Amino acid sequence: MQARLGADIQMQLDVCRRGTRRARRRGRRVAHHAVGEARARDAAPSDQALFGIVQGACSRTYASLSRRARGARVARGGFDGLALGGFSVGEPIAQMYETLGEVAHRLDAERPRYLMGVGTPRDLVEAIEHGVDICSNCVLPTRNARNGQALTRHRTHRAQAGALPRGPAPIDDAVRVRACASGFSRAYLRHLYLAGEILVLRLLSLHNLHYYGELVAAAREAIVANGYAAFKKAAIDGWSEGAV
C-alpha cells in the first residue's frame, strides 16, 4: 500500500506494546515480511526507501530489549534506514533524553537514524547530539502556530489571550521569513490573532517552519565546524526555562 501511494520513505509496520518479548518477536516477523515483500515484488525502487523500526525504547527498563531488537534487525539488513519508536509518549523528558543517549548511537551509522514522534526545538538539538538524522513531530510547528505560538531563539511567544508582546519589532529578526523579514510587528500579529484573522495563522506557521529549518541548518554547520557542543549550549541557554 505504501509503495502504491508513492511514499518516499516506507515504514515497517511496528508493534507498539513496548518492551515485551512477545512484541519483540512479532516485530522481527513483521520486519522479515516487510523486507521480503519489497524484494519479491520490487516494491521499493531506488526512489523509495524502506525503514525498520526499533519500538519500545521509551523507558530505561526496556533499553536492553531495544538494544537486542536493534542488533537483530541490523544484522539481517535489508532496510535503508532505522527508526526509533516509543519516545515522547508520556515519560519524563529527562528520562527520554537519557534513554535516547543509550540507544540511538547503537543503530547502524551507515543508515539514516530516524526518531519518531519527536519533537520540540530542544528535542531536536538533543537528538542530533546522539546521532539522529531525522526527527518527526510533523504537526508541531503548524499546530502550535494555529494555537497562537511563535517559536524563537529566545522563548516561545503565545498570542493566545493577547500574550504576544506588543511593540514594533518582529517576532524574531534573525528568522528570514515573511512574518519577520517583511516587518510584521509583534503588535500587529497580536492584533490579527485577537481579531480572529486567519492571516496570522499562516504567518505564524511560515515563521515556525522556517525557524525549524534554520535551527537544523545551524546545527549542521556546527557539526561541520566541530563546534556542536557550543552550539547546543548557546541554543538551550537562549530558550527561557520551559519554553521549548
Image (tube, helix red, strand yellow):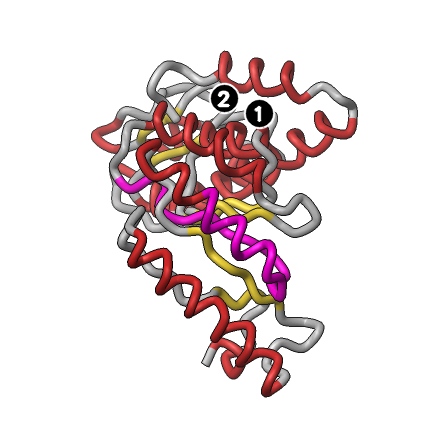
Q: Position of residue 171 (x, y in %)?
A: 47, 27
Q: Position of residue 70 (x, y in %)?
A: 50, 49
> Mark 2, residues whose alpha carbon is within 10 Å: few (<14), some, or many (≥20)?
some
The amino acid type, in three-letter code, at marker 1 is Asp
The amino acid type, in three-letter code, at marker 2 is Ala
Answer whether residue 199 is visible to the viewer in this image: no
Q: Is residue 75 magenta?
A: yes
Please give the label number shown on residue 154: none
Tell which of 235 and 210 is nearer to you: 235
Please give the label number shown on residue 169: 2
Which image quadrant is residue 38 in? bottom right
Q: Position of residue 112 (x, y in %)?
A: 63, 50
Describe residue 204's horizontal placement relative to residue 43 as left or right: left
Answer whether residue 197 is visible to the viewer in this image: yes
The residue located at (52%, 54%) in the rendering is 72
Going by the picture, which residue comes out furthest to the left?
A: 161
Please give the label number shown on residue 173: 1
Do residues under tags 2 and 1 come within 8 Å of each other at their CB atoms? Answer: yes
From the viewer's perspective, is residue 217 above or below residue 43? above
Tell which of 181 and 142 is nearer to you: 142
Q: Secondary structure at mark 2?
A: loop
Image depth: mark 2 or mark 1 in front = 1
Q: CA distance from mark 2 to mark 1?
A: 8 Å
The residue located at (45%, 18%) in the rendering is 239
The span shown in magenta is: 67-89
Query: Quarter of the image containing the C terminus?
Result: top left
Tell which of 9 and 13 is nearer to you: 13
Q: Position of residue 241 (x, y in %)?
A: 36, 14
Q: Secondary structure at mark 1?
A: loop
The residue located at (48%, 31%) in the rendering is 102
Q: Is residue 51 magenta?
A: no
